[in-house]
Amino acid sequence: MIAIYVRTRWSCYFALSLFSILLAACGGSEGHLSAQGDPAGPVSLYTIGGTVTGLSAGSFIALANNGVDDIVLGGDGTFTFPTRLATGRAYNLSIVTLPVNQPCTHTYGAGTVAGANVDLLNVICGLPPVGLVNATGNLTGPRYSHTATLLPNGKVLVAGGFRASALGIADLYDPVTDTWSATGSLATARYFHTAILLTTGKVLVTGGFNAGTYLASAELYDPATGTWTPTGSLATARSAHTATLLSGGNVVVTGGSNGAVLASAEVYDPSTGTWNATGNLGAARSTHTATLIANGNVLVTGGANGVTTLTSAELYDPVRGTWATTGSLATARWDHTATLLPNGKVLVAGGDNLASSLSSAELYDPATGTWAATGSLATARNAYTATLMPTGNVLAIGGVTLPGTYLASAELYSPTTGAWSATGNLSAARVWHSATLLTNGKVLVAGGFDGSSLASAELYW
């Protein structure tokens, strides 16, 4: 009877969410089905959990799944929420109560159950960063315009990139041993592509550029075997696009360029390995940003259309497959960053306007659909990285100030004060690099370009 209750409660919930007209029909259905039984038979339920790391001795943290099911933890280790969920049900990890005087954040916290237990939710706690940047081992070869993806096992996959030509090589960084090693090579060398960690634990790489050719091909990396396999190709070849993991586990790819700037969008279904067209953007754009916000929609900002930079912003609704305009940026920009903050707002900063690099920053409020100015970067920069830290601050690293000064500087944005402050410099200036928050709270910076391709890597904490 418990399984019947859980199934019926969630079925009613989704009916309420998607079709408000069914409100009356949902009311009271639990008792009816509990009495009559479920003709579909028993429902398989799966656990939702993960790992807490870095929690100070004597501290406590409270977590919730889907806003309920609270648990309180008093130390590092694995955790599992009391309520199990059926295949197709959404999970959404949140931190209800932070430990005293210790910041914490989480990764891989939202998705959909896919016929297996979910154990990859990571809660990371750490002290405020002191701005230390230390060199670590080198990549197996220099590269820039690559991708870097944090895997469920805590390692980092760096794939593709450019060095004299497009690269098909891939590396793994192990934070436990502080070493790099080669892993299986991509079937197709590429750069300016995207890489997304799927809820299955595999990594989806899409599109990019190679030897004058825009790519439609896509590949999957399996951390269990260290191998790549082809998957369905995009309908439209593209580079400088975005790829966003949706709360349901699908991936939406937007815009980009294949010689012409694109307004099209496509959705990848991991269960079938296929792509399907979805609604077109209201404006063609490339080198824009796409951010999944708390309500499950995707916020797309700025970019360039081949003629000028854009101020416009749009929201994608995955349920309807449609786009709607929302408040416009105050400043047109592309090659900028967008970071979802713990308070649900989105920080957009830097970029350029085809003439010069920008230092201005803006905050998007999903509740009102409007933008507000916030503190400007100390150094105008584009083609840099922005990383949400365990403290809730945002770390901006490197980049370039037009017309061509490569940057080694780094800054921290405080959502509390709305101001940026300088932090430790990189040992090497770099642009088109990658920055990945590790499960130990450190940030791994790898590769990039400073007039030549870089193999060096650094750790920030």
Image (spheres, helix red, strand yellow):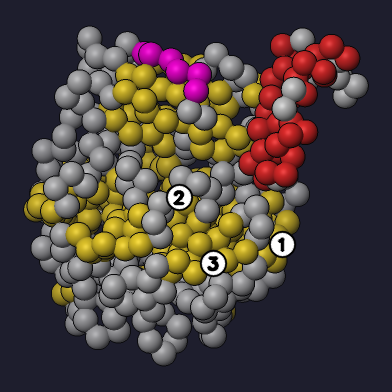
Q: Disc 1 and disc 3: Cα gap in Å?
A: 19 Å
Q: Which residues are magenta?
A: 68-73
| Secondary structure character of the magenta stretch overall | strand
* Relative side of 431 to 211, left or right: left
List x then y, in percent, for residue 167: 47, 64
* Relative side of 338 to 355, left or right: right
Q: Which residue is mark 2?
A: 293
* Relative side of 124 to 21, left or right: left
Q: Which residue is mark 3?
A: 324
Q: Which element is circle 2 on? A: loop
Q: Earlier in the sequence, mark 1 or mark 3?
A: 1
Name which residue lies at 53% across and 48% down: 296
Front-lying residue, 183 or 59: 59
Residue kind at label 2, given as amino acid type: Ile
Residue 262 quadrant: bottom right
Residue kind at label 1, given as amino acid type: Asn
Front-lying residue, 343 or 206: 343
Name which residue lies at 49% across and 69% down: 325
Label number found at residue 276: 1
Q: Which element is circle 1 on? A: strand
List x then y, in percent, for residue 442: 26, 38
Q: Disc 3 and disc 2: Cα gap in Å?
A: 15 Å
Name which residue lies at 30% across and 84% down: 354
Is residue 1 on the magenta stretch?
Answer: no
Name which residue lies at 84% across and 11% down: 35
